[in-house]
Image (cartoon, rainbow, N blue to C red):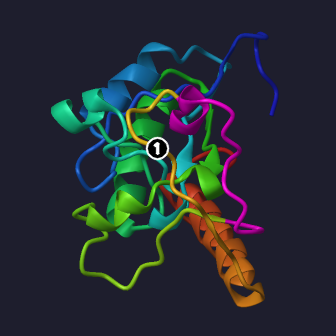
C-alpha cells in the first residue's frame, strides 16, 4: 500500500453503531470526513464475536444514548461496513479494519444484549487463565467504567481454536466488506 502522505487516522472508539452492532450512517460520515486522497483510515476496534466485545452498557453514555461498539461477525454487520468502506474509498483513501477480541476485559452482561440474548453464542470474559484483572484500588477494578470488571474463565484448547476461527471469519468478512486490509 503506497500512501500519498504520512497522516493516518489511528483507531479511536466512536460507538456509532446500531443495536445490532452494525455501523450506521454516522460512522460512514465520520470516517469519510477524515479520509484523504492516498491516505489511510484504520477503524476503531471491531469485535470478532460477542464473547470478545467489551462495550455494551458499561458506559452510561452508551446505555443512555444507544451507542454500540462495532462487530463484524454477522452478515448484517459486514454489509453495513460496506457503506463505510465505500465512503472512504470515494475520497480516494485506503481503509483497514482493526479486528479484536478483548479477552478478560469483556463484561459478562453482553449475554443480555439483544443480539446475543437467548442464543447459544459464547460470552466473555475469557482469558488464557482464570486470573482476574489485578485490583489495587477501586478505580483499577472499574477501568473508568461504572461497573466492576468480571472475572474471566480460562479458555480450553478447543475454545482457543474456535477463537482463532472467529478471527479468520472476521477477516474474511472484512474483505467481503471491501476493506483494503483487515
* Number of callouts: 1
- 95 over 4 or under it: above or below: below
Tell me: 174 left or right of 15: right
Label 1 secondary element: loop
- 5 over 65 or under it: above or below: above
- 85 over 87 or under it: above or below: below
Q: Residue at x 70, y 68 (%)?
A: 130
Q: Residue at x 36, y 31 (%)?
A: 28
Spot occupied by residue 181 in the image (x, y as percentages of width and height):
69, 47
Spot occupied by residue 3 in the image (x, y as percentages of width and height):
77, 21
Question: Overall secondary structure of the magenta stretch?
Answer: loop
Tell me: 31 left or right of 117: right
Residue 141 lies within the magenta run: yes
In the image, 18 versus 171, the foreground residue is: 18
The residue singled out by tag 1 in the image is 148
Q: Is residue 101 visible?
A: no
Q: Is residue 130 visible?
A: yes
Q: Local crowd at mark 1 within 10 Å, few (<14), some, or many (≥20)?
A: some
The span picked out in magenta is 127-143
Q: Residue furthest front?
A: 137
To which quarter of the image does residue 6 belong?
top right
Amino acid at each position: 500500500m503506497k500512501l500519498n502522505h504520512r497522516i493516518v487516522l489511528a483507531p479511536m472508539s466512536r460507538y456509532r453503531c446500531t443495536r445490532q452492532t452494525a455501523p450506521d450512517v454516522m460512522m460512514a460520515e465520520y470516517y469519510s470526513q477524515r479520509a484523504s486522497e492516498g491516505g489511510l483510515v484504520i477503524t476503531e476496534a471491531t469485535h470478532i464475536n460477542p464473547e470478545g466485545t467489551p462495550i455494551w452498557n458499561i458506559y452510561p453514555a452508551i446505555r443512555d444514548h444507544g451507542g454500540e461498539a462495532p462487530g463484524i461477525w454477522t452478515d448484517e454487520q459486514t454489509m453495513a461496513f460496506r457503506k463505510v468502506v465505500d465512503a472512504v474509498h470515494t475520497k480516494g483513501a485506503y481503509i483497514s479494519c482493526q479486528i479484536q477480541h478483548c479477552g478478560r476485559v469483556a463484561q459478562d452482561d453482553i449475554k443480555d444484549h439483544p443480539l446475543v440474548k437467548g442464543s447459544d453464542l459464547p460470552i466473555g470474559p475469557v482469558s488464557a487463565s482464570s486470573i482476574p484483572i489485578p485490583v489495587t484500588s477501586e478505580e483499577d477494578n472499574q477501568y473508568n467504567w461504572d461497573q466492576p470488571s468480571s472475572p474471566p474463565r480460562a479458555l480450553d484448547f478447543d475454545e482457543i481454536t474456535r477463537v482463532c476461527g472467529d478471527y479468520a471469519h472476521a477477516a474474511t468478512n472484512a474483505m467481503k466488506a471491501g476493506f483494503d486490509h483487515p
